[in-house]
Image (spheres, grey):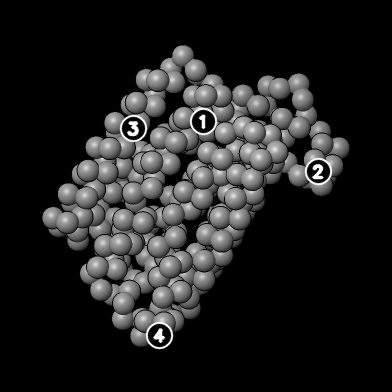
Amino acid sequence: MALELTEFLQGSFNVIFVLISIAVGLKILSRYFRYKKIHFILVGIIWIGISTPWLHGAITFIIYFFDPLLIETAEFITIRFIIGYTSIPIITTLWFVVFTDLMYQKEKRFLIWLYAFISVICECIFFIFLFTNQYDLIGYFSGPFTAVYRPFTRFSLLFFLGSSLVSFLIFAASSLKSKTPEIRLKGKFLIIAFLTYTACAVLDSFAFFLTQPIMVVLIRIFLMLSAIEFYFGWILPDFVKKIFIKTE
């Protein structure tokens, strides 16, 4: 089985995006050792975590060159769905730990327990569906790297994505009110990063957007840009600060 151009682009760009996301996450996480703030560890883990919907595709692309028949087995497909889904509820709950620690501290206990409860329910339903009727209840792969999700999987992922988007925009927007130019600039980068990521994630969930090589390339490039923008929003390197703050 030879990969078509579109499939090759999907797989290779998945690998690149995941590697960039891991590098960004580890870089943010490493700031803990300088500032001793637990938020850097959590945020680093969060960014690595939200790249997992593309991680299974990256792993598949690498395995294809060693054992192409393995990626078509039922066991491997099941593992792919587990990798692509199970981390998202956990990462969303983890983000609300950070979000409520920085804002809405009075509501912290309620929001964390709420999302933890929803996450546990969704994880339980996911595994029941996965081992009951995976094809009809979870989804299937229409190609080596294109997942077609059923309603539960699609809408629960959109719920976690939407919740994260709204809370993230609230958090980032509060930075725009700061009198400090650096903080305002960080807020702008964070808003752009998560809007870019969300748009790409939504487009990537519709298989018909992935039938043309140019669309695959554009979506993955913007995904990579979202990782870089996220890094700028949390770290704000000096060279970025010099470029943008001058023009404010």
The amino acid sitting under disc 1 is Val
- In the rendered structure, which disc, 1 or 3, sits on the residue that comes first in sequence? 1
Separation of residues labelled 2 and 3 (CA atoms): 37 Å
Residue drawn at (76%, 44%), measured in percent from left and top?
A: 237
Q: Which mark is residue 238?
A: 2
- In the rendered structure, which disc, 2 or 3, sits on the residue that comes first in sequence? 3
Residue behind mark 3: 116
Separation of residues labelled 2 and 1 (CA atoms): 25 Å
Q: Secondary structure at mark 3?
A: helix
Separation of residues labelled 4 and 3 (CA atoms): 43 Å
Please state which of the two labelled residues, at mark 4 or mark 3, is closer to the viewer: 3
Mark 3 Cα-neighbour bin, 10 Å: few <14, some 14–19, many ≥20: some
Q: Nearer the viewer, residue 187 or 130?
A: 130
2 and 1 marks in contact (CB < 8 Å): no
Residue behind mark 1: 98
Separation of residues labelled 4 and 1 (CA atoms): 44 Å
Residue drawn at (77%, 25%), measured in percent from left and top?
A: 180
The amino acid sitting under disc 4 is Ala
- Is 115 on the left-hand or right-hand side of 132? right
Up/down of 178 relative to 162, above or below: above
